[in-house]
């Protein structure tokens, strides 16, 4: 009986829409599942509330994303978690007192070597402050040998032996992303510490003078668009092209007391690896709720797991939004 009802109801249903039928027998769920497998339809749920079936197969939510937004296209590596600063909204809770939790050169070399075959198109190195690592130039060389690489930094440590580390880095396939939150010191320093704005601007100028491609990223802690306009105008004077000016909202993660609520259900994942495992997104690398697996390698297996989890979230959300009871 349930099969006849499915045929009748689905024949009058548009592709992608769902129907719900009551359970009339303990065997209805198994019959419906087998019928859906044979006919190319999708069993969404089968419980005491009834059987919900989608006409046809759902589209792959990953295939609908632009190529550079697909999970795994951008691979984030937390090189370390300690930092010379203690920004009051840091998503990773980094500070001079934070344990290093370094990913390590050997592990990064393994990841970088495996990344192209795993479908990665860009590696992003972040922390913490990566320039605290004595072997950062070797880390960067390993990554740029494999793929285009972005290195995130606060730009404040470009002197002495750390300047030499910077100078030893390849210019090809490397972008330095330096943090600067405002056009003047007050706002930036209020979150990052007195004197940090001046040092960050000096770091931007040093990186440009050394011949690096420089991107500047700001975290907006207010809704004041005037602040953003002033910042962009200031970056123009430094010679930072508009396409290399990144302005992002504050995320309610880590040390931040407020900001956007970002969850696995709402975020398109950007695979993020730390010494502790594989996380959903770089803004949540200190949040165990967004830990996907402790197993970093094989890399393609870790990326596949993130992709399958994303598919599950999106398809379940779509099914919940589209399901309606039969009349």
Image: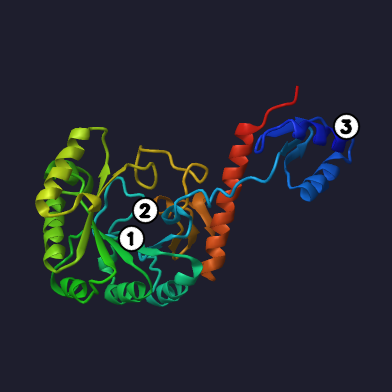
- Image mark for residue 92: 2
Tell whether 163 sits left or right of 55: left
Q: Residue at x 44, y 76 (%)?
A: 113
Tell whether 189 sits left or right of 129: left
> Is mark 1 in CB contact (under 8 Å) with mark 2?
yes
SS state under label 3: loop
> Is mark 1 in CB contact (under 8 Å) with mark 3?
no
Image vertical order of residue 79 relative to residue 165, above or below = above
Rendering colour mode:
rainbow
Residue linked to disc 3: 24
Q: Of callouts 1 and 2, which one flags the residue occurring earlier in the amino acid sequence?
A: 2
Image vertical order of residue 321 relative to residue 172, above or below = above
SS state under label 1: loop
Whole-percent x and y of residue 187? 17, 41
Q: Of callouts 2 and 3, which one flags the residue occurring earlier in the amino acid sequence?
A: 3
Q: Foreground: 257 or 159?
A: 159
Local crowd size for mark 3, using a 10 Å CA cut-off: few (<14), some (14–19), many (≥20): few
User: Residue at the top extreme?
Assistant: 327
Estimate the spatial distance between the alpha carbons at disc 1 and disc 3, rounded to whole Å. Answer: 57 Å
Tell whether 79 sits left or right of 172: right
Task: State the quadrant of the N terminus.
Answer: top right
Residue linked to disc 1: 127
Res. 120 image quadrant: bottom left
Q: How many marks?
A: 3
């Amino acid at each position: 009986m349930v099969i006849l009802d499915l045929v009748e109801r689905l024949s009058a249903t548009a592709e992608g829409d769902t129907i719900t039928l009551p359970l009339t027998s303990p065997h209805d769920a198994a019959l419906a599942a087998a019928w859906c497998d044979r006919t190319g339809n999708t069993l969404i749920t089968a419980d005491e509330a009834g059987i919900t079936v989608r006409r046809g197969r759902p589209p792959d939510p990953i295939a609908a994303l632009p190529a550079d937004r697909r999970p795994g296209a951008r691979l984030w590596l937390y090189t370390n978690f300690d930092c010379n600063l203690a920004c009051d909204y840091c998503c990773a809770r980094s500070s001079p007192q934070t344990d290093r939790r370094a990913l390590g050169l050997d592990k990064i070399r393994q990841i970088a070597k495996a990344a192209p075959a795993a479908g990665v198109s860009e590696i992003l190195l972040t922390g913490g402050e990566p320039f605290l690592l004595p072997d950062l130039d070797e880390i960067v060389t390993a990554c740029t040998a494999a793929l285009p690489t972005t290195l995130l930094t606060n730009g404040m440590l470009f002197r002495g032996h750390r300047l030499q580390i910077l100078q030893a880095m390849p210019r090809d396939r490397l972008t330095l992303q330096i943090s600067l939150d405002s056009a003047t010191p007050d706002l930036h320093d209020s979150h990052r510490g007195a004197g940090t704005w001046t040092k960050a601007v000096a770091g931007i100028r040093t990186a440009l003078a050394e011949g690096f491609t420089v991107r500047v990223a700001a975290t907006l802690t207010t809704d004041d668009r005037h602040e953003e306009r002033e910042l962009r105008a200031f970056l123009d004077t430094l010679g930072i092209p508009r396409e290399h000016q990144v302005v992002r909202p504050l995320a309610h993660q880590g040390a931040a007391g407020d900001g956007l609520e970002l969850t696995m259900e709402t975020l398109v994942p950007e695979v993020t690896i730390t010494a502790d495992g594989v996380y959903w997104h770089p803004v949540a690398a200190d949040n165990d709720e967004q830990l996907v697996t402790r197993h970093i390698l094989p890399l393609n297996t870790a990326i596949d797991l993130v992709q399958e989890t994303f598919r599950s979230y999106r398809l379940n959300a779509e099914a919940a939004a589209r399901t309606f009871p039969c009349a």
